[in-house]
Image: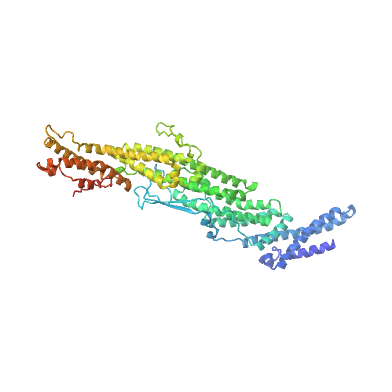
Amino acid sequence: MDSDGSKLETAERIILRWDSTASEEARGKMIFQSDRDEVDRFLRAVDEIQRSLSSTSISFASSSSSSAAAASAAVDDYEVKANSAIQIAMARLEDEFRSILLSHTTVFEPDSLFLEESSVSPSLTVEVGDDSTVTPTTDVAAEEEEINSPGGSGSGRLTRRRSSYRSTSSIREMDLIPPEAVSDLRSIVQRMVAAGYSRECIQVYGNVRKSAMETIFKQLGIVKISIGDVQRLDWEAVVGKIRQWIRAAKVCIRVVFSSEKRLCEQLFDGICIAMDETCFMETVKASALRLFTFPEAISISRRSPEKLFKILDLHDALTDMLPDIEAIFDSDSLDTIRAQAVEIQSRLADAARGILSEFENAVLREPSVVPVPGGTIHPLTRYVMNYIVMISDYKQTLDDLIMSNPSSGSDPNTPDMDFTELESKSPLDLHLIWLIVILHFNLEEKSHHYRDTSLAHIFIMNNIHYIVHKVKRSPELREMIGDHYLRKLTGIFRHAATNYQRATWVRVLNSLRDEGLHVSGSFSSGVSRSALRERFKAFNTMFEEVHRTQSTWSVPDAQLREELRISLSEHLIPAYRSFLGRFRGHIESGRHPENYLKYSVEDIETIVLDFFEGYTTPPHLRRR
């Protein structure tokens, strides 16, 4: 006991020298900031007291009953001193533990935390030309970076930017604390745990590291915000926050949380059962749950079509991070974090499916009845087709989410669709085809609001041609729609063009027939000049009326416009040339021929060029 008492006294003196409650000098200095010899002396002193306490208990337990009474007083005094010293030592080590953690808390530059976008995934930028968009309902807003609203300013170009969050990156751990400091911290942990101070050790670690986590979150732009606060934000603001959250969440999961877990393992693994898991949970649980508040709010927010693609971005990002979340939060104590991430992913998937269904209904029920001027492309058509093209960009994700076919024919007020001829198509493909079917159905209803039947045919021709054009311009969408249905659409707009020509030009061409012009007698002398004059007069009147109206009509696609002019010219010009050639002399030999022979064949060819230009006011008739 004398030898042990001497060692205890030596150890006690070393510890008391660093008693911050009794020494001003001790309060102003930290042991682990001193030279290493002093650190080693203090740690050996703690070990000696621990050893002495253990050996005292063993010695006392093995003492004979005759010597027990004599030894009891000495042991009591010995233990009081040792326990007093160990309490002082633990208080000191707690301060040292806190000091080392604080002094080595890394302050990150925000940009240094973000993973390189190029290593995550490339962005696909596609220019979609001169399109503007409109919402099917007043609640549906235009989607993506640049979509101009009807009547708004701007170039009218939509830039589609599709960033897939299928990342090739994985967990990227960082040294939050230098290796030499980790060694010092671990030496403190070992002694605090051995002395029964594991709870105090966990508490200090949790307080310091939670504060560090709070700082990192602020640097990443992740602030405390409730679900209600998120749902009250304008969608424009939410879009920006979604982009910010995806970047920040990747860093939090793959860098911050993974590095924190590694630090816990470095300090606590092997010292005390599950102590590393406990410290990790204490440090990150609240932050992790806060991180998922934002996507949770989005997943349960009011659904509307403009939200679909950002919801899919969130879903893709979360899906991509789930394996990392499972790997990092793998203990039972952190099961709530894993469960929350999976639940939010599921809700986002449900929201995407629900939005697609609601979008279909919005397209079908879009109520506008005012005809678009000139029979041009309806804003609904532009909006829906731009939306469908965007959907095709998310084919990989939506193919996994859309599992059921659209329900057609269940309502007598909706079009029927036979899916048997499209058996090879996926449910997502069928939903896109169904969207085009119900868009066509709605457009047919809108065409009935034109008083001029010819203009109604032009309207259908323009809009279905636009649909075909959009499908052909997107390889992904064309593959999804398929050539079979594309040929069907092509047939629809060509049929509308034929119907237009019949509705407009049959009556005009009838005025150029021979029937009713001849009277009895020879052919050359048997032409009724008065009837002939009426025919030329009728043709001039009808042709001028067609020009007056159809020069204000619009066929926006230049190639289609030219094809339509050529087609009508192929019928009109030969008929007029023949009629003029056969009967011109009869009019010229009479009075005031200029009142009837107003247009040459060349004049007709020139005037036709005014058709479908969409003039606000009809131009003057151009005559040579």
Residue 276 in the image: state x and y as whole percent. Answer: 67, 53
Residue visible at 11% across and 36% down?
Answer: 525
Quadrant in the picture for residue 184: bottom right
Q: Nearer the viewer, residue 583 or 611?
A: 583
Residue 398 in the image: state x and y as whole percent. Answer: 49, 43
Asked whether, in this view, residue 488 is left or right of residue 175, the answer is: left
Q: In which quadrant of the rendered image does the N terminus lie?
A: bottom right
Residue 5 in the image: state x and y as whole percent. Answer: 82, 62
Residue 79 in the image: state x and y as whole percent. Answer: 79, 57
Residue visible at 39% across and 40% down?
Answer: 487
Q: Nearer the viewer, residue 65 or 370?
A: 370
Residue visible at 28% across and 45% down?
Answer: 566
Q: Nearer the viewer, residue 100 or 167?
A: 167
| Direction front: furthest residue | 522
Quadrant in the picture for residue 191: bottom right
Residue 16 visible somewhere in the drawing: no
